[in-house]
Amino acid sequence: MQARGELDEALRIRREEELPVYERLGDVRSRAVTMGQIATMLSRMGDVDEAIRLRRDEVLPALISLGDADEIVNSRAWLASYLLDRGSEADCQEVRELLCSALTDARRMKISVAQEIEGSWQTTASPAIRVVSDRYES
């Protein structure tokens, strides 16, 4: 359903049908995961600032309060990705902190996302990544 051209409908379903169910049930984890999916869709649709806001202000705090380590790692990596997409040098320190934290936790938990995060340091497609990578290496 999330293929190109269907994102608007997928977004509507998540917001108008799924979220209200989780809110009625008091299912904080499912709500946070769904909000993360919404953030990803918004980012793909070009609304990076709203994707950042959702991850930073709603998703991560909920996951941290639940202690859901796997989802915290993933959400930090996604937030770093959105910040990189925004392309502002002002975000470099936060990107570095998010990726370092996510990588440390992923290595500790021995989960596969650690390799993806490590790969982010090697990427040179984005000027912001180069700045972050240079700062991380020094």
Image (cartoon, rainbow, N blue to C red):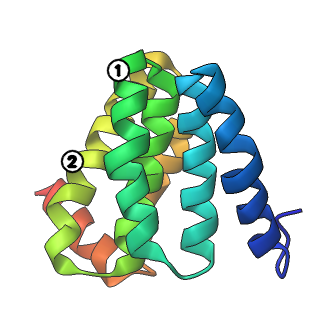
Pick the residue in front: 31 or 98: 31
Inter-mark Cα distance, 1 to 2: 19 Å
In the image, is 122 to the left or to the right of 74? Answer: left
Question: Does residue 56 appear anywhere in the picture?
Answer: yes
Residue of label 2: 97
x, y (%) of residue 111? 56, 26
Mark 1 / mark 2, whichever is N-terminal: 1
Question: Does residue 112 appear anywhere in the picture?
Answer: no
Pick the residue in front: 25 or 94: 25
The amino acid on which the numbered mark 2 sits, given as a three-letter code, is: Glu
Of the numbered discs in the image, which one, if any, rests on residue 65? 1
Q: Please tell me whether mark 2 sits on a helix, a strand or a loop.
A: helix
Pick the residue in front: 129 or 73: 73
Q: How many other residues sit within 10 Å of disc 2, few (<14), some (14-19) or many (≥20)?
A: some
Of the numbered discs in the image, which one, if any, rests on residue 100? none
Q: Are marks 1 and 2 in contact (CB under 8 Å)?
A: no
Q: Please tell me whether mark 1 sits on a helix, a strand or a loop.
A: helix
Q: Residue at x 45, y 21 (%)?
A: 69
Q: How many other residues sit within 10 Å of disc 1, few (<14), some (14-19) or many (≥20)?
A: few
> In which quadrant will I find the C terminus?
bottom left
Pick the residue in front: 43 or 10: 10
